[in-house]
Image: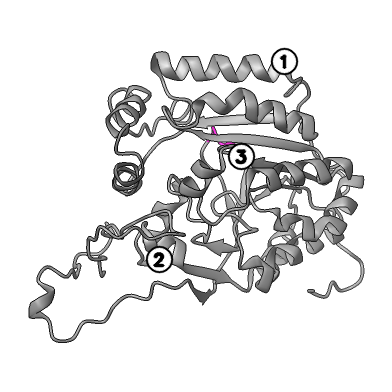
Amino acid sequence: MERDEKSTAYLNGRGAQLNTDNRFLKNTVSKEYIEAIDDWEVSNEKTTFIIGSAKSIVNKVESPDVGMMYSLNPYQGCEHGCIYCYARNSHEYWGFSAGLDFERKIIVKEDAPQLFKKFIEKKNWPAYPISISGNTDCYQPCERKYKLTRQLLQIALAYKQPISMITKNSLILRDLDVIQEMAKQNLISVFVSITSLNENLRQKLEPRTTTAKQRLKVIEQLSKANVPMGVMAAPMIPGLNNHEIPAILKASANAGAIAAGYTIVRLNGAIGNIFKDWLAKNFPDRFEKVWHQIQDCHNGNVNDSRFGTRMRGEGNFAQLVNHTFKLHCRLNKLNQKKIELDSSLFKKPQAQLHLF
């Protein structure tokens, strides 16, 4: 695996600023003395798309604290480049780095619609809600071209298969027609992720995502279409965005959100080094404070893998975030009623369903 040469030049439009080693690969290649190398293949800095295939597309979620039973991801890797993304580590299973590779080498699962249809046609499938984007964003920019998510929603509508979604891209509004039809039958709910209302911070944390203003517009327009809407104020990063919880929840509720959630940032696997490098380059003046506060939330570490505590953290700071979140949920009348989708309508179409 080639590692990017360390440089003081900042890669604008990218979250990660380096490629970390892949833990599954025994050998790595790096440039140590470039003046002694006559020929060196420089890695492609542009986003590239790799057509992939899989045996299955729907995964049973074994983790008890993520709020979903089944997930589906039509893309592996994510152009959004969110520096904190927990899905970065999964890119190593494909032979890539969790760093820059994750956001510039995108695997497109072109057979996702066919595999989805095959899965829900299994005998005795109870039509449990399936979460689209349990790992990477199904509305990342390349969806504009490949339209895999739209095809998945069309199949779900035809079969009356309930779907939950989470995104941070306003491209979801393209599919308002299908989503609205599903909402009429209580077959869909959508959460929008908002990490910060501060545009300067958003650009550094999530360089290729849509603005918070646009995300609030998504909540507003889908809510007006009677889609049950929620907001994920996540992740909360001590010393960077935790103070924004009241404003995020208020703005989201005003836009029509009825539910909310949050997480404390956790830097598992390769994400620790990727985030640490990013933090030092973007916020050198408060690097020590932010890093140590993250550690305070995870018993002296920057990650906690224990179910139940890994996403909420422990300690005084984590408790303060939790209390602030609960208070402003009450003030904004969020989470007063649990969103429950209808699985009773599920039915395989009599006629052959043609993929769109």
User: The disc labelled 3 sits on which kind of residue?
Assistant: Ile
Check disc 2 and report its element: helix, strand or loop.
helix
Q: CA distance from mark 2 to mark 3?
A: 29 Å
Q: Is residue 301 above or below residue 121?
A: above
Q: Which mark is residue 331?
A: 1
Residue 121 placement: quadrant: bottom right
Query: In the image, is 258 to the left or to the right of 302?
Result: right
Q: Nearer the viewer, residue 151 or 333?
A: 333
Query: Which residue does the image show at 42% across and 17% down from the upper left?
Result: 317
Image quadrant occupied by the N terminus: bottom left
Q: Which one is earlier in the sequence, the residue at label 2 or at label 3?
A: 2
User: The disc labelled 1 sits on which kind of residue?
Assistant: Leu
Check disc 3 and report its element: helix, strand or loop.
loop
- Colouring scheme applied when the structure was drawn: one colour
Q: Residues within 10 Å of mark 3 (few under 14, many from 20)?
A: many
Q: Is residue 238 above or below residue 191?
A: above
Question: Which region of the structure is painted magenta?
Answer: 64-68
Residue 108 in view here: yes
User: The disc labelled 2 sits on which kind of residue?
Assistant: Trp
Q: Looking at the image, do the residues carrying marks 1 and 2 touch, with CB atoms under 8 Å apart?
A: no
Query: Which residue does the image show at 46% across and 51% down from the upper left?
Result: 87
Q: Residues within 10 Å of mark 2 (few under 14, many from 20)?
A: few
Q: Which mark is residue 194?
A: 3
Residue 138: % across, % down: 63, 58
Q: Nearer the viewer, residue 75 or 223?
A: 223
Q: Which mark is residue 186?
A: none
Query: Which residue does the image show at 85% across and 58% down from the upper left?
Result: 178
Q: Which mark is residue 94?
A: 2
Residue 313: % across, % down: 43, 24
